Image (cartoon, grey):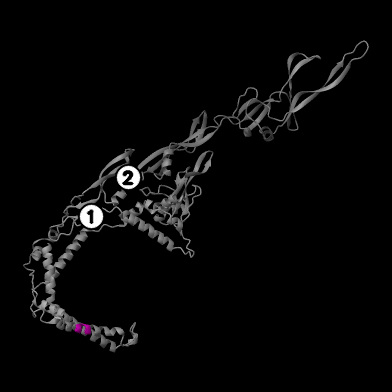
Amino acid sequence: MAKWLVLLLFFMVNCSWGTLESSYEEGTNYANSLQDQTKAALSTINKSEIPGFTTDNPPEAALYDNAKLIDDQARQSLQTSDVGQTITETAKTRQRFTIDPNTDPLFTAAQEHSMEEILNIKDEQEVRQAEGVIEKTCEEGGEDITYECFENRHVVPQVPIKTATLNINHLAFSPKNESYVVQTRSGGWNHHGEWETRHRQNGWSLTLPKEINAFKNQFCQGFVARDIKTGATFNIDCARIQNFKINDGAVSEANGMVNVVVPSFVLVGGHSFWGGQRQQPLAASINITLYHDTFEGEEIDEWRSNCDSFEQMVEQDLCQYGERVLTQGAGTRNINGYLITKDAWQYRQLYHCKMIKDECSILRTQGCYQVGSRCKEQRQNKCWIYEQKYQCPNGKLSLSKTKTPELGAFCLTGNCHDTSYQANGEMLDVVSRLSVLKAVQDDISLQNNSDGNFKIFSGTPYTCSRNCVNFKDCCGGMNGWGVKLHLAGCKPEEKQLADMRQKNLCHQVGTTYCAKKVMGKCLKKKTSFCCFGTKFAKLLQEQGRPQLGLDWGTKECPNCRALTIEELTKMDLSKMDFRELFDDVMKKYKQPDLNNLREVTKKQIAENMKRIADGLKPKAKSGVVGENQDSL
């Protein structure tokens, strides 16, 4: 093939000399005619109307005359200089070659064989040959899986009012005294006996309001539901006491008050020195019965479910809420002997889930091709995680003789040479880093800071909520794997957040937290994010903050501040992973239409071959080339 190309080139160069003289004369005559037409047109129009016209004799007008003068001088030098005479002599004596398109093998091949045969284009694809490959494995998310769980209503009916009787001593008892007469000296035959009046405590007095609210205000301060004699404890909510009854002492009522007097001594037997029974003092206390409506088994009405594990997957963006169906509606049930009627007793909740994992796209962008696959984890008779096997370039890859335009070399005669290339592992880093630097430049160009204090890649805080009562999800899994997210009824900023998360522009700050809780049950959850204008900004913030020692704030109060130029200069880009950017670049690449490319190539080659054949057809000789120096 190399021989034919050399002959063709040599033939074209030699044949071109044969037409130089006539072509030059034709071109000169044509140029002169155009000049004459231009001059005639200029003489008939108003020159002031010509755009850009300045004068009748612009400096450029002398260029033509100068060029002609130079041409005349060059021709004269051919006759006087040694170099010029050598060129003239060589032109006269050089050997001429002619190629007949009717008999030349190059052109007869085009007539005897199809264009596919000449270009060696085949429909079959040949297997790629590699000098060395390395086998790699990666994991990808598997099939969509739908889980179901049930939420059941748990009810314990309210019990009747209960009573508790106990001894208490926490109230403010007052001592009760009495007067008594004591003989200090007995009488005799010669004198009378002596007596005196003394005072002693003989009990405790207590006054309590009869009205129940006033009673609770006085009684509940310092109250502990424990019997001071037996140590028994009771389940009593003092604020829910309905009534009371004093069981010992002298009890009387007057003016809405209950007066109680209890003894402060107890007889223990024997006699005192001066006579009378021995007594032992008692601490102030009363025995009281409390009527209340608190007890074990107080009314409970709550929903209990087995959906907790799926709720955690929702927070991890692995699941989205599906349909919520009422499976057991309004009805009456007998619970602990009581008839309880409710409007709903059970719901079925669906969760649409998918493992979001993609470790293989980066291998495909590096030229790896898949050779195997297996299911690594199976759930619900479906594959949850796939383990994929790839073969990747390891050093130099060689391609054998190819049969398709996408893999093969251009083969004009059918003898194709093997092509080879060196795998470039730095391509990914180069493209990604250039994209980051361009994004930084674009972000700075949008700012108007005369002092040079630029803020780069500022973020905006967003929050979204999940209602745990009606399973309304305004956050949802934003990985775009096929389940439509219903945002009707969500706030505008939540809808905007959903759109930005779909574009992978947001970073989640902390974990999902409970924003509203009633009686220990979470009714609303919230999740916080920092969102950025571009994916470059998000990646740079995510991977740059750890290098700078910057955090993201708290889940309740995210810190989405921008970066400064000084902070940017401190970042080590070589330690950052920009594969996500490279993937975006590769996604924008469009594979050419190979069929169309093949047809266009065939058409162009056929047209070029025809032009060559037409240009090589013998013509009538107009003279010997080289006899006229103008042919040079």
Front position in the image: 9 or 330: 9
* Residue at image point 12% right, 73% down: 14
Q: What residue type is labelled 2?
A: Glu
Outermost residue, right side? 190
Q: Within the magenta stretch, is there residue 188?
A: no
From the image, give the main secondary structure of the stretch colored magenta: helix
Residue on which disc 2 sits: 140
Q: Is mark 1 on a helix, strand or loop?
A: strand
- The picture quadrant where one finds residue 306 is top left
**444 w.r.t. 514: above or below:** below
**Mark 1, other Cα within 10 Å: few <14 / some 14–19 / many ≥20:** few
Q: What residue type is labelled 1?
A: Tyr
Front position in the image: 120 or 62: 62
Q: Within the magenta stretch, is there residue 72?
A: yes
**206 w.r.t. 383: above or below:** above
Quarter of the image containing the N terminus?
Answer: bottom left
**Mark 2, other Cα within 10 Å: few <14 / some 14–19 / many ≥20:** some
**Range drawn in magenta:** 68-73
Image position, residue 279 (x, y; %): 75, 18
Residue on which disc 1 sits: 421
Image position, residue 580 (x, y; %): 35, 52
* Residue at image point 17% right, 59% down: 410
* Residue at image point 30% right, 84% down: 59
Front position in the image: 384 or 34: 34
Outermost residue, bottom side? 43
